[in-house]
Amino acid sequence: MRLGFRTNMNIMNDLPGKLVFILFCFITTLLQAQENTSEVLKFSMKTKWSENINENNVWDVYPRPQLKRDNWVNLNGLWEYAIRDLSDEFPDQFDGNILVPFAIESELSRVKKMVGENKNLWYKREVKIGKLNTNERIHLNFGAVDWEAILYINKRFVGAHKGGFTSFSFDITDYLDKDVENEIMVKVWDPTDSDTQPRGKQSLTPNGIWYTPVTGIWQTVWLEKTNSNYIKQLKNTPNIDDSSLVVKVNTNKISEALTLEATIVDKNGNNVKKKSIPLSLGSTGSALEIEVPDAQLWSPENPHLYNLIIQLKNSKGELVDNVESYFGMRKISIGKDGNNYTRIFLNNKPFFQFGLLDQGWWPDGLYTAPSFEAMIWDVDKTLEMGFNVIRKHVKTEPASYYYECDKKGVLVWQDMPNGNYLNDLRIEAWDTEDAKRTSNSSFQFETELKEMMDQLHSFPSIVVWVPLNEGWGQYDTKRIADWVSSYDPSRLNDTPSGWADRGVGDLIDVHIYPGPGMEYSEENRASVIGEFGGLGLTVKDHLWWDKRNWGYLTYSSKSEFENRFEELINDLVALKSFGLSAAIYTQTTDVEGEVNGLITYDRKVVKMSPEKLNNIIQPLYKEANNVKVILEDSEHHPKSWMINDEGNDTKNWFLNIDEKGRWQEKKAPFASYDNFFLPKGSHWIAEKALKLYNVFDLNEVPQNISLRYYLDKAKMKVFINGNLIATEEFQGGRKRHYRIKFIEKAKKFLKKGKNIIAIELESSQKDSAFDIGIYSTSIQ
């Protein structure tokens, strides 16, 4: 890339050598910075909604459905922007226009520029406010700004907020000049992945599972008029066991005694129940409990919502503030099923959850969908394909997103956007100690976590909090888990999702690619797969970039992709019988270099027909069968096998095993290294192939069986009574977990009485390990 100046080499020759070197380094750094910026933002892709954006009517959807007022003004649209040094204040001139609420790095912003940690991003626009009554206040609300935002009105400091995923509001009344144009300025600083603040999957160097930076305003900005005494926040908590609702109302510090009144209204507009309580002078709110007679429960099959009206009234009965809200009567909990497995219960009944890992990224808008309709299209497709859960992965969405999930009956697992992947904050699955955070870093994380939980509390679709994902900034795990559970006991707590389990929270969560595999449920924790699958299918003309694309297993053939997906689901069905309560498949859409979505990044190609997906998935929602041990694996107690590692090439040895031949009895599991996750078994010299066999007896012959196996950096062939039933090889994933292989119609090669399982085992790399067991889930 050329810069817009020419160098006089004679002058350069006259300069001292050190100064020339410093100047050379400066120019080189500048060139590299511009090249890096160009590389990050050079890719482009549009969705079908991009062309329909009206700059004068952008995202014109009421942004806060749980606390709704009619008196609001949408400030989305064209603002002015400037990128300036950190030391600069109040730019004299701005660089151009930016379309809010799209991040400056996005194509839809009309700018598409990088900012970085060494610059501030400035926004400016003007608003005219008419004459106000003495008891009226004007509030400026922001849906989300990444990351630190400082607000100025008419160049006067109003306030600041740190956190890129939660909303915030300022009362700007005292800073306004009436009946003239008032200048709004917002200064934003965002270090992206150069610091420890929550940032999700953003990276200054996108690659693999890390994406383009997002800086600045990325959700709706709006003005709102209220009384001087007003409601600030609601938290609605249902209790289906005693048919009641607890409504916690936060207000500003009220200047007179008021009455707080809550009214439940059914879908026909009829009042169901009303209750009021007094608020004393100086109060900042209170909580009330109100009966919900003959409550209709909220569930995916029947996502019934009640309307809720909350009012403040003065001593004369005059209305001071009025907000509309809603709630759903649902309960999420842990309990024992008929087979004594600990499972997830919805409304006091076992309920299997199967969903998609949803990143919520867009090629044209990055964090922000081109429109409300585009955002909800993803939700509708998820339901159409047969899933009932969305795991919103290290990102939050506008409140209107969760409202639609509430109305449509989609369950949501909500991640805290941690994403702290710096080396000193990342731990491995086998690490016994958590990462260490500074007090400032942990304070910021926990502040943003609490804000997220407070703001999303009232949405019934959200059933699980995920405070920590894998080892990304995993610190003080037990303390974080205990706090989340005590702060919101109305939801389940998954801490952490995958990786280094600490025995806390409500779920024992496995991440395994492609999988599937699981850990057994515990007395007080249900077993779930927080991530698995990740099958990639590249679709020509629908790829983000010309670099290497990422998938845990990537196919170019659609039929191979579909067949492998169906295999995974069949294996997953078998896992239900082992006590599995939920699973999350990776993922909804391709994202930048990731091609493991069920839909392309531009939302133009659904890789497998929703009807076919739905048919494949439906068996997951049937009642699980009992599991029966045929030949137990050695995960907890080493089991004996007969092995031969002499490497002779006897073909078809598995057809007629000479049990008196050169066999040695050894204990499984077999490993060529000290495996942190397995019990002590037998050493396997990885250079040697192994032949193994075992004997099991059957009184009854099952129709189907499942192989529960551990296979690390190796490949195996499995024979039963001389019949090849499975060929498997290591395909990546986590060392901690066993996998399941479902064998359909196993009855044809099994028999009553004595049966022999034989295995050919070969190491594919230096560190290899193996174990296996046989189970059935039905007897016919």
Image (cartoon, rainbow, N blue to C red):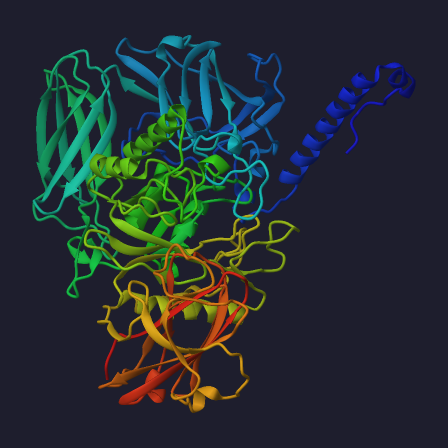
Name the residue furthest bottom.
656
Depth check: 597 or 281 in front? 597
Where does the image place residue 345, in percent across and percent down from the top left? Answer: 20, 54
Where does the image place residue 21, in percent across and percent down from the top left? Answer: 79, 22
Relative to 518, 596 lies left or right: right
Relative to 103, 739 lies left or right: left
Number of callouts? 0
The N terminus lies in which quarter of the figure?
top right
Relative to 730, 578 lies left or right: left
Relative to 575, 207 lies left or right: right
Residue 618 visible in the displayed image: no
> In which image quadrant can residue 752 be found?
bottom left
The C terminus lies in which quarter of the figure?
bottom left
Where does the image place residue 529, in percent across and percent down from the top left? Answer: 35, 56
Where does the image place residue 353, in percent across and percent down from the top left? Answer: 29, 57
Which residue is found at the position 34% from the left and 57% from the top? Answer: 583
Residue 382 visible in the displayed image: yes
Which residue is found at the position 54% from the left and 67% from the top? Answer: 764
Question: Can you say whether 380 is above or below 66 in the image?
Answer: below
Name the residue furthest right.
10
Depth check: 58 or 756 in front? 756
Depth check: 564 or 339 in front? 339
Depth check: 333 or 339 in front? 339
